[in-house]
Image (spheres, helix red, strand yellow):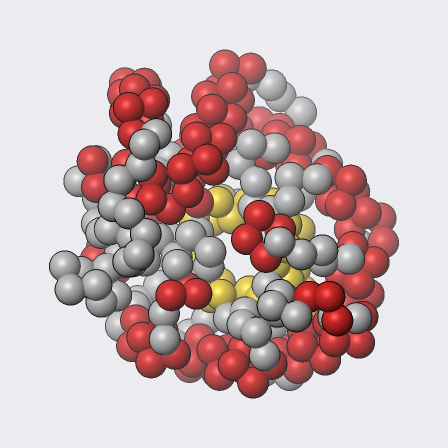
Amino acid sequence: MIVPALVTPFDAAGHPDAAALQELIDRLAPQVDGFLVLGSTGEAVTLAPEERAELLAALRVEKPLWVGVGDESLALAERHARTALDAGADYLLAMPPRFFDRVLDARAFQVYFEGLAELGEVWLYHVPVFTKMRFPVEVACELARHPRIVGIKDSSGEMARLEHYRRFAPGLRVFTGSGTTLPAAAASGAEGAILAVGNLAPRLFARVFSDARAGRTDARLAGLAYETAALVGRGGVVLLKQALRHLGLPAGAPRAPLPETSPLWPEAERLLARLQEEGWLL
């Protein structure tokens, strides 16, 4: 399964643009297996609760829908979760609180994630590049014992973590969030991938993932996928949105104070030309 971690388009006034996001969803829908809205790539941390609610209420999504709900307190995360469920979310994706990470113990993780699981089906989200904190793998496996904590998106790129989930949390659905380690994740048993680059070239990553799951290797395609994911990883949402705009897709600009353009653009433009020539772009 390939699920794009959707960007959130903003209009010229800097407001979330639900119509543009719906257009992007409709363009992607034939090539993907579901959608993540309001994740890291969706700049969710920049949206007020009222903006989240208005955006979600305007969307029509006919495939499995993950919605990012993580925040710094259980109360805020629960508010986001209720909004997401009212809008038809299938799964609540939650990174742990991180501001007070030095005092987060196993019980704090339990209170937070099990509190969310009272509302709906929860997916854990480990994304250390943004949280700058450790999500103990043993805590994740312990949380997986809860009947409504059903999956994890692990963006660390650490294959040892994925192997640990498979061995010690066999009922947990494991998706990778790392495009650069996609073949290794698929080979180690990951069920799917939730990827920022899924906005851009979903068929390429679906092909590489399915090949790896089947024990096949196309080194050239795997290398192209790696190069694309690595570049988007370096440039982040600024470069991704610039690439989508270049292709005429409804991405909008990042929200201020993020810049509209990336210094990596010349490199990205050359890579996009290769991807377009081979027919991999959306």
Residue at 78% x, 51% y is 165
Horizontal and vertical percent position of residue 258:
32, 52
Image-quadrant location for residue 91: bottom right
Q: Is residue 34 visible?
A: no
Q: Is residue 61 visible?
A: yes
Image-quadrant location for residue 249: top left
Horizontal and vertical percent position of residue 265:
29, 29
Residue at 60% x, 19% y is 217
Horizontal and vertical percent position of residue 151:
65, 60
Q: Is residue 109 left or right of residue 26?
A: right
Q: Residue 13 or 138: which is nearer the viewer?
A: 13
Question: Which image quadrant: the C terminus?
Answer: top left
Residue at 24% x, 51% y is 253
Q: Residue 159 or 35: which is nearer the viewer?
A: 159
In the displayed structure, 243 sits above or below 40; it is: above
Q: Residue furthest left?
A: 12
Q: Is residue 204 left or right of residue 18?
A: right
In the displayed structure, 233 sits above or below 85; it is: above
Q: Residue 96 or 69: which is nearer the viewer?
A: 96
Residue at 39% x, 59% y is 43
Q: Is residue 202 left or right of residue 96?
A: left
Q: Residue 187 or 257: which is nearer the viewer?
A: 257
In the displayed structure, 72 sits above or below 227; it is: below
Q: How many marks?
A: 0
Horizontal and vertical percent position of residue 28:
32, 47
